[in-house]
Image (cartoon, grey):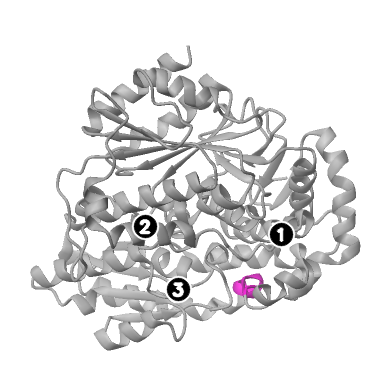
């Protein structure tokens, strides 16, 4: 199989044997063809209402074609005006797909999926004269993207630039955001298919508009998806989506709750981050599901030594400890993984199109923003070690030095559980924080995920609250040197970021999960101390 062909190979013989009956069952049920035909009854009567308005992604390789001309026309207009820098304000499915598309294509796109004041300030510091911002939100009510829109609109106006001419909107038809865009006279509004959920929206306007404006060949993506669409609709055990779903389902039945994702030279940049949201939000509910663990490569801790509680999936050729290999170009992979995820939902008995536990953290954050004194004061740290303040939920030991606290925390992880590192920091300036994932996984032998907050709240956040309840959560927050006000809102970005961290931690604790929050009073110094403490704790 060449790198341009799309397919799935189950490398592990034992897994292949267990997967075969499930693949035959899906084929006998006609599941793939029914999915392609948008049959909302595939996941049972409880899911039918939601599924009936969430299946248009199966035909986007056809229905998204008219967008291509609109995108090309707008890009040409902007370039004629000297506007060639694209900033995207979007969360979850609105940002993850465009980021993968542009990174793979090698074209620049500044992605804002953060509330960190420093990262947003860096985006503002770019050449505003050359900048257009694409604000993507199904409703317009997403607090992060609404804040970005307000901040950029003011920055444009302060620079003497007509803000309305530099704001492009992607939203659903008839949404409050589409009405606001018309009222404000924004440059252009692209209306996405409303019958597609965010994590399945890679080939809608949410994925194609920002990527196309940045210079990616999005028509080619649709061609790639179209090239495999008929194959993915076939009711055979050889259908690659059926094979992938059956392998995941069989592994889950055998106790492998996690799916470790590593790129093995596919040429696709950042695909595990996109797949992470798709799998986690679609399957992580009702106390079950698959937890995706995105790692740096086939030699990374957690992949090379995945253990019995995880399945190792290579994106590209099978290398190292890979049990499954998935190949193909990006557009085809988008559709393949979406089909497989929807089909595995049928196998494990969940509705892959709802996200019942996502709203809880948002509500908790809003409650904190409505109580500024509580947010400002907060609780006193249980322990302070250098530039690190230590806070723990009920039952989490905070005694001793930072290394002692971490040693106790790592030692208390449930059998077959996982550690989730959640960094509410600057994804660019504090990028080295992500190295903690591999360091902790290597030294503890526990499957470990890493997420930038609040980005992960729109991704793995659903699984954390709704999936297997065996996670332990390490939050990392940091001092804000220069905050940014949000125009016409009673809070700053720094306050919003802090509220999101505390709110999610509160909800996790209410679910009985251990939460250890480490606040870096000096980000650089605190991070260095944290790395040393992790190394010492695991000795």
Secondary structure under tag 1 reads loop
Q: Quadrant of residue 309?
A: top right
**Where is residue 60 drawn, in percent x and y?**
60, 73
Q: Residue at x 21, y 58 (%)?
A: 492
- Residue placed most toward the observer, 127 or 374: 374
Q: Which residue is mark 2?
A: 365
For marks 3 and 1, the one nearer the N-term is 3
- Between marks 1 and 2, how big is the CA–CA gap? 28 Å
**Where is residue 229 drawn, in percent x and y?**
70, 66
393 to 209, vertically: above or below: above
Q: Residue at x 84, y 45 (%)?
A: 19
Q: Residue at x 69, y 63 (%)?
A: 351
Q: Nearer the viewer, mark 3 or mark 1?
A: 1
- Between marks 2 and 3, how big is the CA–CA gap? 20 Å
472 to 39, vertically: above or below: above
- Residue 350's disc is 1
Residue 257 shown left or right of residue 376 in the figure: right
- Residue placed most toward the observer, 131 or 392: 392
Mark 3 near mark 1, Cβ–Cβ under 8 Å?
Answer: no
Secondary structure under tag 3 reads loop
Residue 316 shown left or right of residue 388 in the figure: right
Q: Nearer the viewer, mark 1 or mark 2?
A: 2
- Quadrant holding the N terminus: top right
Q: Residue at x 22, y 34 (%)?
A: 521
For marks 1 and 2, the one nearer the N-term is 1
Q: Which residue is mark 3?
A: 138
Q: What main secondary structure does the magenta stretch of the protein show? A: helix
312 to 387, vertically: above or below: below
504 to 185, vertically: above or below: above
Q: Quadrant of residue 56?
A: bottom right
Secondary structure under tag 2 reads helix
**What's drawn in magenta, residue-wise?**
54-61
């Amino acid at each position: 199989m060449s790198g341009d062909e799309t397919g799935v190979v189950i490398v592990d013989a034992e897994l292949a044997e267990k997967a075969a009956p499930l693949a035959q069952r899906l084929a006998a049920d006609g599941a793939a063809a029914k999915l392609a035909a948008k049959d909302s009854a595939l996941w049972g009567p409880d899911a039918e209402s939601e599924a009936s308005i969430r299946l248009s992604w199966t035909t986007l390789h056809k229905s998204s074609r008219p967008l291509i001309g609109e995108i090309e026309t707008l890009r040409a207009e902007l370039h004629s005006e000297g506007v060639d820098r694209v900033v995207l304000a979007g969360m979850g499915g609105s940002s993850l797909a465009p980021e993968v598309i542009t990174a793979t294509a090698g074209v620049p796109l500044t992605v804002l999926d953060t509330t960190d004041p420093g990262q947003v300030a860096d985006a503002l510091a770019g050449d505003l004269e050359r900048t257009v911002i694409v604000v993507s939100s199904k409703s317009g009510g997403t607090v992060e993207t609404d804040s970005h829109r307000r901040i950029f609109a003011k920055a444009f106006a302060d620079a003497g630039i007509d803000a309305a001419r530099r704001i492009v909107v992607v939203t659903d038809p008839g949404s409050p955001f589409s009405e606001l865009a018309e009222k404000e006279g924004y440059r252009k509004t692209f209306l996405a298919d409303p019958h597609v959920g965010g994590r399945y929206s890679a080939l809608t306007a949410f994925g194609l508009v920002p990527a196309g404006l940045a210079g990616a060949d999005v028509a080619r993506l649709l061609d790639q998806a179209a090239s495999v669409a008929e194959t993915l609709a076939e009711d055979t055990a050889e259908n690659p989506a059926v094979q992938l779903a059956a392998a995941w389902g069989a592994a889950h039945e055998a106790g492998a709750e996690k799916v470790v994702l590593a790129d093995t030279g596919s040429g696709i940049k950042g695909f595990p981050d996109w797949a992470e949201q798709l799998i986690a939000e679609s399957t992580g509910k009702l106390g079950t599901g698959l937890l995706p663990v995105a790692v740096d490569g086939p030699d990374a801790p957690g992949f090379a030594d995945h253990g019995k509680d995880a399945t190792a999936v290579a994106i590209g050729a099978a290398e190292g400890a890979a049990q499954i290999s998935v190949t193909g170009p990006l557009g085809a992979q988008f559709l393949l993984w979406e089909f497989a995820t929807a089909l595995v939902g049928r196998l494990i008995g969940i509705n892959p199109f709802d996200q019942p536990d996502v709203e809880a953290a948002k509500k908790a954050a809003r409650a904190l923003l409505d109580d500024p004194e509580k947010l400002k004061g907060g609780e006193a740290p249980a322990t302070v070690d250098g530039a690190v303040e230590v806070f723990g939920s009920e039952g989490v030991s905070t005694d001793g030095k930072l290394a002692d606290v971490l040693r106790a925390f790592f030692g208390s992880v449930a059998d077959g559980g996982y550690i989730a590192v959640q960094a509410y920091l600057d994804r660019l300036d504090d990028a080295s924080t992500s190295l903690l994932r591999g360091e902790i996984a290597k030294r503890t032998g526990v499957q470990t995920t890493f997420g930038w907050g609040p980005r992960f709240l729109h991704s793995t956040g659903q699984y954390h609250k709704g999936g297997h309840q065996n996670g332990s959560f390490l939050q990392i927050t940091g001092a804000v040197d220069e905050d940014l006000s949000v125009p016409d809102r009673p809070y700053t970005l720094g306050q919003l970021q802090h509220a999101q961290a505390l709110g999610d931690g509160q909800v996790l604790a209410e679910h009985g999960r251990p939460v250890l929050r480490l606040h870096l009073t000096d980000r650089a110094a605190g991070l260095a101390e944290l790395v040393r403490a992790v190394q010492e704790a695991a000795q």
